[in-house]
Amino acid sequence: MQRIAGVDEAGRGPLAGPVVAAAVILRPGQDLEGVADSKVLDPQTRLRLALKLRREALGYGIGWADPAEIDVINILQATFLAMRRAVLALCVAPDLLWVDGNRLPSLTGLCPGLSARAIIGGDASTKVIGAASILAKTTRDTYMNHMDALYPEYGFANHKGYATPRHLRALELHGPCEMHRRSFAPVKSWSTCPP
C-alpha cells in the first residue's frame, strides 16, 4: 500500500517566530473524526487531536526554519526548508507527499522515488493534510507560548507573533527582539534589539 505523507505549515505570516511544518503518515483505517484544517478548530480541540495524532499516526515529523533563516532566504524558501526538514524527520519513508498549497519543495535528497502533489486547500479537503496542519499549528503555538516567558513584553502567547495592535505597540516601545523577522515590514523599520 502506498504511504502518503500530508505536509502543511504554520506561521508564514507572523512578524515573529519560526515557520513550522509537519509531515504525517496515517495508519490505514485510522479514526480521523474531527480532523480538519487547524484554522477552523478551537485551541482545545487542536491540542486533543494533536496528542491523538502523535500517539496513533504511522509516523510524523516536525521541521522549522527560524527567523534568521527566514530573513536570509525569504519566507517561501524557509517554508520549503521547514517542509523538507519535516519529511526528513519522519520515522517511516513516504512514497508520496500531498502538500497544501500550489507549490512544492524540492524533493532532491529526500526518499528515493518520492513524488509529490500540491493540493490547493488541501488542509480543508484532505484528512492527511489536515492532520499535518494540526501538528504544525500546535507545535508552533506551544513554542510561541514558551517564548512569551522569555520575552513577556511582546505578548507572544496572545498573538503568536502576528501583527496585532498589541504586538505593533510592543514593537514601537521595545524594538524587535531575536524572535522577530527583520526582513518583514514593519519590523525592519526598527533596527535595535531591546536591552
Image (cartoon, rainbow, N blue to C red):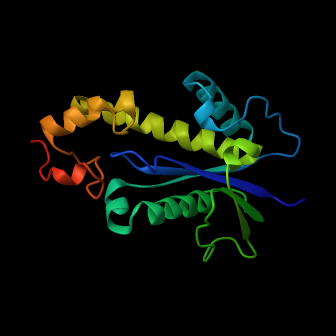
Q: In the picture, which quadrant includes the C terminus?
A: top left
Q: In the picture, which quadrant includes the N terminus?
A: bottom right
Q: Is residue 28 left or right of residue 140?
A: right
Whether residue 156 is visible = yes
Estimate the x, y position of residue 102 in percent, counting from the top left.
Answer: 63, 61
Whether residue 149 is visible = no
The image quadrant that residue 5 belongs to is bottom right
Q: Is residue 23 left or right of residue 149?
A: right
Residue extending furthest left?
195
22 up-or-down from 195: above or below: below
Residue occupying image coordinates x 60% and y 62% = 88
Q: Is residue 109 left or right of residue 94?
A: left
Q: Is residue 3 left or right of residue 105?
A: right
Residue occupying image coordinates x 13% and y 53% = 191
Q: Nearer the viewer, residue 77 or 184?
A: 184
Estimate the x, y position of residue 165 in percent, counting from the top left.
Answer: 29, 31
128 up-or-down from 85: above or below: above
Residue occupying image coordinates x 21% and y 32% = 169
Residue occupying image coordinates x 61% and y 38% = 134
